[in-house]
Image: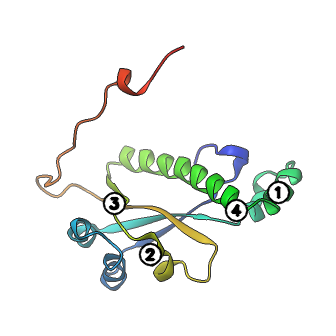
Amino acid sequence: MGPTSANACPLRIVFVQSTSEKDKLCKTAMEANIAKIKSAPVVALFAYDMKFYEKMDKLYPTGKFLQDLFAKSSEDALDREALRNSTIQASYFLMIARGMGLDCGPMSGFDPIALNELFFKNTNYRINFICNLGYKDGDNPYPRLPRLDFEEVCKIL
């Protein structure tokens, strides 16, 4: 995958495919997302490792100072850094998946505390978002919604 800040690479992905694990996941989901989760061939749990800096000796071998800095950082600072960079990495993943013809349905309609408890207990991982992955099967019951125009989201100075 592509670059992240300080090559931190905090993204960790769990692919949920079995019915029993999807049922567990559904216990954390908003009602509107349950049918989507159950019908998807695979649901990716995009999480981040709060101790991502422990891998920096491999990922940024000349940046020992950064590994030391992150090791001393507050939980809030680590959470911001890991969330930001895992989102960048997950975006790369989604672009690659779409390029391979997969449909992607990212969602944030779930209880993150319950999800972390069920899937990441006794780890340093925290959920960022979930995403249904699969190939189109017939008509899409969830047509693409409108997007903002370039001028509505960008400003050139």
The answer to whether 71 appears left or right of 42 in the picture is right
Alpha carbon of mark 2 to alpha carbon of mark 3: how far?
18 Å
Contact flag, marks 2 and 3 (Cβ < 8 Å): no
Alpha carbon of mark 1 to alpha carbon of mark 2: how far?
28 Å
User: What residue is shown with label 1?
Assistant: 67
Q: Nearer the viewer, mark 3 or mark 4?
A: 4
Image location of residue 149, percent across then percent down: 32, 25
Q: Amino acid at mark 3?
A: Leu
Q: Quadrant of residue 23?
A: bottom left
Q: Secondary structure at mark 3?
A: strand
For disc 3, the neighbor class at 10 Å (few under 14, some 14 to 19, many from 20) is: many
> Quick one: label 1 or label 3, which is nearer the N terminus?
1
For disc 4, the neighbor class at 10 Å (few under 14, some 14 to 19, many from 20) is: many
Q: Secondary structure at mark 1?
A: helix
Q: Secondary structure at mark 4?
A: helix
Q: Which colour style is shown?
A: rainbow
User: What residue is shown with label 4?
Assistant: 52
Image location of residue 68, percent across then percent down: 86, 58
Q: Quadrant of residue 44?
A: bottom left
Image location of residue 20, percent across then percent down: 33, 86
> Quick one: label 2 or label 4, which is nearer the N terminus?
4
Residue in the image at 88% along x and 51% along y:
65
Residue 143 is tagged as: none
Alpha carbon of mark 2 to alpha carbon of mark 4: how far?
20 Å
User: What residue is shown with label 2?
Assistant: 115
Alpha carbon of mark 4 to alpha carbon of mark 1: how far?
9 Å
> Quick one: label 3 or label 4, which is nearer the N terminus?
4
Q: Nearer the viewer, mark 2 or mark 4?
A: 2
Contact flag, marks 4 and 1 (Cβ < 8 Å): no
Q: Secondary structure at mark 2?
A: helix
User: What residue is shown with label 3?
Assistant: 133
